[in-house]
Every structure is written in structure tokens, then in C-alpha cells.
Image: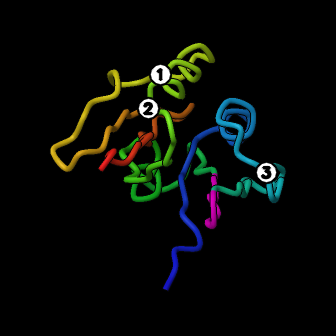
């Protein structure tokens, strides 16, 4: 099995499209902004960014602005962190070495969803 698709829920699809495409430089596969979603390529997987309207039920609204558990692998986390900071990306802190040997940095998209940069251990 291979992971094919992950979904992130946002409150503003236009702002999210700009963030993931322009700021993070993820290739845009499907521009469904007029229909409330966009699909981006990320390695061998796709990232679907989907809007949840302000009048959606609360069980749908809670999907926006949370820790997603999604990580983007980078070769040089300090360089990517510095680049994204310069583009205005909000991080919860600087990259931190983890007990398993890698380094993580958590950042937020335009809807407050938390995602991570990860650089594997130099073993």
C-alpha cells in the first residue's frame, strides 16, 4: 500500500490556494477553487485542500485550524525554515531536534492548520 491522498480543511479556499501554491511552491494539479477545493502534488501523494463554509455544522467546522499530522520532508530544514519565515509563514517555534534523530518545525497555513517540516536523521 502507498499513501495517495491527504486532505486539509480550510475556511478560505482562495487564501489557501495562494499559500500552498505560491508560498509553499506545491504544484497545482487541479484548480477547483470555484468548487471549493484545490489539489496539489507533493512527492508521490496528492494534497486536497477543501473549504468548510462558515455555516457548516460544528462537526465539520472543527476540521479547520487544527494539527493535521502532515509533514513535508526537506533536505535542509534550517534553509527552508528561513525561506518560509521570509515569506511570512507563521511557525510555532524554530526547528527542534527530536529524540528519534530528526528535526521538526511546525508551521500554520492561512486557516491555522498546523503542518510540519521534517528533516530525517543524519545517520
Seen in the picture, residue 72 relative to 29 is either above or below; the reply is: above
Image coordinates for residue 29, horizontal then vertical, percent? 80, 58
Q: Is label 1 in contact with label 2 (beta carbons under 8 Å)?
A: yes
User: Residue, x 66% and y 40% (percent of image)?
Assistant: 20
CA–CA distance in space, label 1 to label 2: 6 Å
Label 3, residues with CA under 10 Å away: few <14, some 14-19, many ≥20: some
30 falls in the magenta region: no
Image coordinates for residue 97, horizontal then vertical, percent? 24, 34
- Left or right: residue 112 compared with residue 48: left
Image coordinates for residue 81, horizontal then vertical, percent? 48, 25
Q: Is label 1 in contact with label 3 (beta carbons under 8 Å)?
A: no
44 falls in the magenta region: yes
Q: Which residue is mark 3?
A: 28
**Element under disc 2:** strand
Label 2, residues with CA under 10 Å away: few <14, some 14-19, many ≥20: many
Q: Which residue is mark 2?
A: 107
Q: Earlier in the sequence, mark 3 or mark 2?
A: 3
Seen in the picture, residue 55 relative to 3 is either above or below; the reply is: above
> Residue 101 appears in which quarter of the rendering?
top left
**Element under disc 1:** strand
User: Residue, x 44% and y 32% (percent of image)?
Assistant: 107
Q: Which residue is mark 1?
A: 90
Amino acid at each position: 500500500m502507498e499513501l495517495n491522498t491527504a486532505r486539509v480543511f480550510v475556511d478560505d479556499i482562495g487564501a489557501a490556494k495562494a499559500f500552498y501554491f505560491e508560498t509553499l511552491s506545491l504544484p497545482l494539479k487541479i484548480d477547483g477553487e470555484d468548487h471549493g477545493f484545490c489539489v496539489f502534488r507533493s512527492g508521490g501523494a496528492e494534497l486536497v485542500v477543501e473549504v468548510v463554509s462558515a455555516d457548516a455544522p460544528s462537526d465539520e467546522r472543527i476540521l479547520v485550524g487544527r494539527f493535521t499530522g502532515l509533514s513535508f520532508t526537506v533536505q535542509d530544514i534550517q534553509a527552508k525554515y528561513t525561506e518560509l519565515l521570509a515569506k511570512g509563514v507563521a511557525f510555532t517555534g524554530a526547528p527542534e531536534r527530536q529524540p528519534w534523530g530528526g528535526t521538526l518545525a511546525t508551521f500554520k497555513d492561512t486557516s491555522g492548520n498546523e503542518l510540519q517540516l521534517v528533516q530525517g536523521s543524519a545517520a
